[in-house]
Image: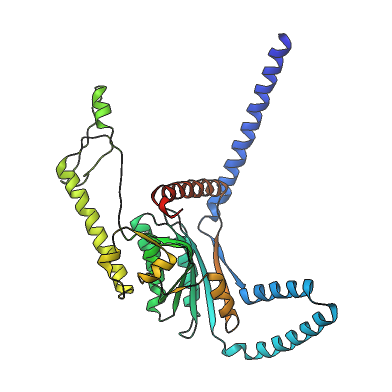
Amino acid sequence: MEFLSEYAGFLAKTLTLVVAIIVVLVAIAAIRGRGRRGSGQLQVRKLNDFYRDLRERLEHSILPKEQFKATRKAEAKAAKQEKKASAGKSRVYVLDFDGDIKASATDNLRHEVTALLSMARPEDEVVLRLESGGGMVHSYGLASSQLVRIREAGIPLTVCVDKVAASGGYMMACIGQKILSAPFAILGSIGVVAQLPNVHRLLKKHDIDFEVLTAGEYKRTLTVFGENTERGREKFQQDLETTHALFKDFVARYRPQLDIDAIATGEVWLGMAAQEQRLVDEIKTSDQYLAERAAEAELFHLHFAQKKSLQERVGLAASMALDRFVLTWLSRLNQQRFW
């Protein structure tokens, strides 16, 4: 028993030391990260080189040695001629937006748009590979405003949806002069939803009072803990209807070919059905479209990389994992008829 007692004491001391070291490391990371917060850099990668490397690797593995050498020689000669003529080639700037509930990727998107607008010409093109199931109204409103900057600068904008662009995601997609969709991507959900629990009756059952004090009749319409009134519910519903009307007007402005009242019901459509509803212009994956454009233009992938502290990286990873879990669960719950 004495041995076990000593061993337990040793383990407790060791655990305390490990926890102390972790706390110190996290504190150091926080101090270092504080000075770097908000900084970042623009990363640019030429996608033509990426596609060429794919082809060359396949040729090296499949073609006979002599044929491979001859092919490479011909390609090198063509590349030299192409390099001379590249000055007059159009450019395609490729951006990615992987949206969570808070549209966190907007912080990177705004810098990427600012950078490309400093060089883009009317004969160039911006391609946005978009994936988002929507989220907060104000967050996706700001994200959409970044794409409006491209339209207003007179630069053609193509939006590619391989998986999902729903609700706030479609608010962004509709700004493109051309929307491409994979055959089974999810699009639409032009609607507004808000929900919250109310535990007032539970608190009342246990004789717990909760006071809500406001200055302004509609400062707080619905609450989680207080007693909700019919007048508050009506005002809350009115606010939702107002937001929905603004959403519809926004989509109709950029997609006038839509029968907005028919499709702004909160429903979603898969790619091929979405094309019939004119939510998208063409059924094509982003891979196919970019591979085609690489044959006639210079493709540049832009990504603004933010430097984040250790806590921010851990918190962001946890937040994105939770967002994806919730969206996946809701999608499977609401759209189970598709599967």
Residue 186, given in percent of the width and then of the height, sits at 43, 61
The residue located at (71%, 13%) in the rendering is 4
Please give left or right for residue 333 compared with residue 266 in the image. Answer: right
The residue located at (73%, 84%) in the rendering is 75
Residue 267, given in percent of the width and then of the height, sits at 33, 58
Please give left or right for residue 182 compared with residue 276 in the image. Answer: right
Q: From what the image shows, is residue 127 above or below residue 86?
A: above
Q: Quadrant of residue 262?
A: bottom left
Specify the farthest residue to the top.
1
Q: Quadrant of the N terminus?
A: top right
Q: Of 325 and 308, which appears nearest the observer?
A: 325
In the rendered picture of this protein, how many numbered marks are placed on residues?
Answer: 0
Q: Quadrant of residue 174?
A: bottom left
Please give left or right for residue 171 compared with residue 159 in the image. Answer: left
Q: From what the image shows, is residue 1 above or below residue 153?
A: above
The residue located at (75%, 75%) in the rendering is 59
Q: From what the image shows, is residue 247 above or below residue 337?
A: below
| Colour scheme employed for the rendering of this structure | rainbow
Residue 139, given in percent of the width and then of the height, sits at 38, 58
Q: Of 202 and 312, which appears nearest the observer?
A: 202
Q: Of 66 and 217, which appears nearest the observer?
A: 66
Specify the farthest residue to the right.
66
Residue 244, given in percent of the width and then of the height, sits at 26, 59
